[in-house]
Amino acid sequence: MTELSESHDDPFALHLAALVVLDDRGVVVGWNRRAQELLGHPDTAVIGRPAIEVLVAPGDLPAVTEAAANCRRAGGWFGVLPLRHRDGQLVELGLRAHELSRGDRGREWFLAGALADDVLEWQRDRAVLDGLYRQCPIGLVVHGPDQRILRVNRAIERFSGVPAADFQGMSTGRMLLSDDARKAVDRVRQVMQTGRPLVYSEQFVRLEQDPARERVALVSSFRMEDPSGRVLGVAEMIEDITDRHRAQRRLALLDQVGSRIGTTLDVAETARELAEVMVPHLADHASVDLLQAVTRGEEPTRAVAGPVVRLGTCGVGAQQPGPPHPEGEPVEFGPGTPQAGCLAEGRPVLEPVLPPDWVAAAGRQGAQAPDLGAHSLIVVPLAARGLVLGVMTLWRSRRPDAFETDDLTLAQELASRAAVAIDNARRYTQQQQTAFTLQSSLLPRAVPDQSAVEVALRYLPASAGPGLGGDWFDVIPLSGARVALVVGDVVGRGIHAAATMGRLRTAVHTLASLDLEPDEVLSRLDDLVNLLAAEQEAVGERPVGEQVVGATCLYAVYDPVAGRCSVARAGHPPPVVTAPDGQVALLDLPAGPPLGLGGLPFEARDIELAEGSLLSLYTNGIIGERHIDADVGLTKLCAALARPAGALERTCQAVVDALVPSRPSDDVVLLIARTRMLPPDSVASWRLPPEPASAGRARALTSAKLTEWGLEHLAFTTALVASELVTNVYRYAGGPATLRLIREQCLVCEVSDTSHTSPHLRHARTTDEGGRGLFLVAQMTERWGTRYTREGKTVWTEQPLTGTPV
């Protein structure tokens, strides 16, 4: 009787089972109510009769006889037999038989029976429960109401390495490190108190006896209660997901490399991004060292082990000491160091466990750890296109677990992806430097010294964006003490924009030497830009009809004698004029189309500028980023120019400081010119009638004025030049001539007339009576030329104030 279960769901429990007692001859001597319910026989119908006669069908007699024989031999039996119901149907019952000793009265047999289906279901439940404790790969921990462990299964034993029996009576979290233990206790207490289960809660499981090994478990917890609602404890299903967690972490790192590294085309920034991705997910400290050639944008040579520059570092913990080499500093890896070998051979290095004296060991001084607690090391090459660009070094000091082979594989994959981004940044840097070198060589090295204006300028190349722009500027001395001020902006970025800028600047110089009016200069430039676009279309660089070359330009000519400025623009922002009293205004000019559109005229406008006025020319970069309203930028520019400093250079710098960000996304050109006026006594002008005597008159006037100026040594040559030029006007122009002398950095002699006929320099034959005038002029002066105006033309010459004319 004692072997029968008292469990409420055990079908063989005394209150649930059909109970029958047989004497040693098989006669029924006991029969309970449950037996009557299952088989239909009342006790009066079966007691005293052989059980085989009442309960067994003839066809089942052999099986029943064999079971009875086995029961007699073993003293008990368990199995399933078909028994006959009172109505003749067969009922399959699970039977459990036990021998009862009556002493001298012989033996009796106690049978407990239940429906076979109920028995099988109960057996399956028992098998599942037994499997949970003995065979299930998922851990099971049962906590009592006092949060002490009642039982664990064998999976917990395998997971922890501790025998299952040792857990019994142990407090929750007793074997874990303090941080992990606290989380485990809080979780069990929460489920115990609230009754709400927790499903798939991640838990770090670091054992006190093996703290270097990091495990991760997925825990599901639920409260256990009896039928009356009394809390029996908390059961937890614990699955070891360490390998899965590491795989997910590696995938997350790979995803971060793709999204975080290479966000800019900057070598140093890319190196820093790589170091930051590594910490703390894979390492406690990371450093990225690149060959110096790579930092300069150059392609490294093969098998070069240094020198390197540390461009990226990162470490965990605010109190952690930094690496011995700060960012941007050169690093020397001594012979025998893992980094030197990795650079030379391009092979990764894994040193899972470093000896305590590793840092101070011979031959390793150059590979100092970021702190003395470093115990594990990985060094991987940063290689792209078969070339080693540098190395990445990973250290572990706070994390107790050492680097493994899987960590090395992951580090190699991350380094390989990052190396592509670094190489792209390096090649971009190389292209930028090439473009910058080209651009610098095409821009003016210095502003020429001249009398018309005082100039201050700033040129700032773009430090962000897809490449250098095509902004340019120029200050070009012209005849008659005049000066041309030019700013322009080529559409596009990079080497092509720089090259186009150089061609346009050269064209502007050529056109300026012809002394053309500003609107005429822009018209000629427009023709040139269209020609360049047609050339590109012809060779198939862009689809036909798509504009590939375009530019804006502003061209101004200032005359210090008249105090007048002639300005024209082609789609460029208007200049700003600051009067001597501080009044600021945008010059009202027709905008004109950008260069390259063709077919539309340009219009120049003449303005009077008082001496000491500021004429400010600039490109789009000075008035703000492309997404900012241009009117807002112009308002800020005018406000900055309304407070000019005493020195022009300070004014120029103040405007840049107020308007230009530290890393402009577009090229910036700012050219500020303070106007000057030539003193009246440095200019002399006479109008001469169209008659033969005018030549002699010109010689006399010139000699007298040069004597007055103290330039007697130039009187003869200048008088001869003036005479020849006035004679040409009389012979070929047929109108009055205007003779003007200007004394500035050189002596200028000009003769103007109303004709547009171009003079020609030629060699006269010995028999010719004329034709030698311009030849003599060219021989006796340093420079000469012709400029055309709406009223006619002017032939001018220049001579140095000292020395002998060329």
Image (cartoon, rainbow, N blue to C red):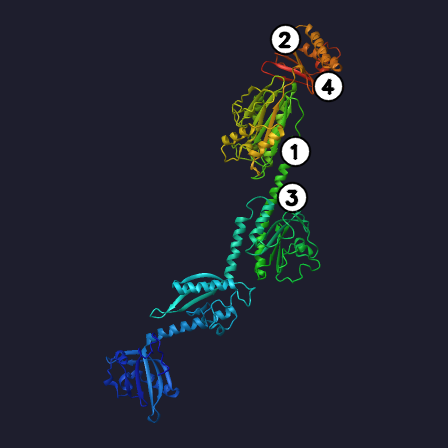
Label 3 element class: loop
For disc 2, the marked residue is: 736
Q: Amino acid at mark 3?
A: Arg
Front position in the image: 665 or 182: 182
Q: CA distance from mark 3 to mark 4?
A: 49 Å
Residue 441 tag number: 1
Mark nearer the N terminus (1 vs 4) = 1
Circle 1 SS class: helix
Mark 2 Cα-neighbour bin, 10 Å: few <14, some 14–19, many ≥20: some
Quarter of the view holding residue 727: top right
Mark 2 or mark 1, which has the lower sequence index?
A: 1
The quarter of the displayed image where residue 611 is located: top right
Mark closer to the chain start, 3 or 2: 3
Amino acid on which disc 2 is placed: Pro
> Residue beneath label 3, please?
296
Q: Is residue 538 above or below residue 709?
A: below
Where is the C terminus found, in terms of image quarters? top right
Q: Position of residue 702 (x, y in %)?
A: 70, 11
Within 10 Å of disc 1 (Cα), the crowding (few <14, some 14-19, many 20+) is few
Q: Earlier in the sequence, mark 4 or mark 2?
A: 2
Number of the front mark, 1 or 4: 4
Q: In this rendering, does residue 454 appear at all?
A: yes
Vertical position of residue 716 compared to residue 64: above or below: above
- Give the mark nearest the N terminus, 3 or 4: 3
Q: Is residue 584 left or right of residue 226?
A: right
Q: Nearer the viewer, residue 430 or 528?
A: 430
SS at circle 2: loop
Q: Is residue 20 left or right of residue 515?
A: left
- Which circle marks residue 801 in the picture? 4
Mark-to-mark CA distance, 2 and 1: 46 Å
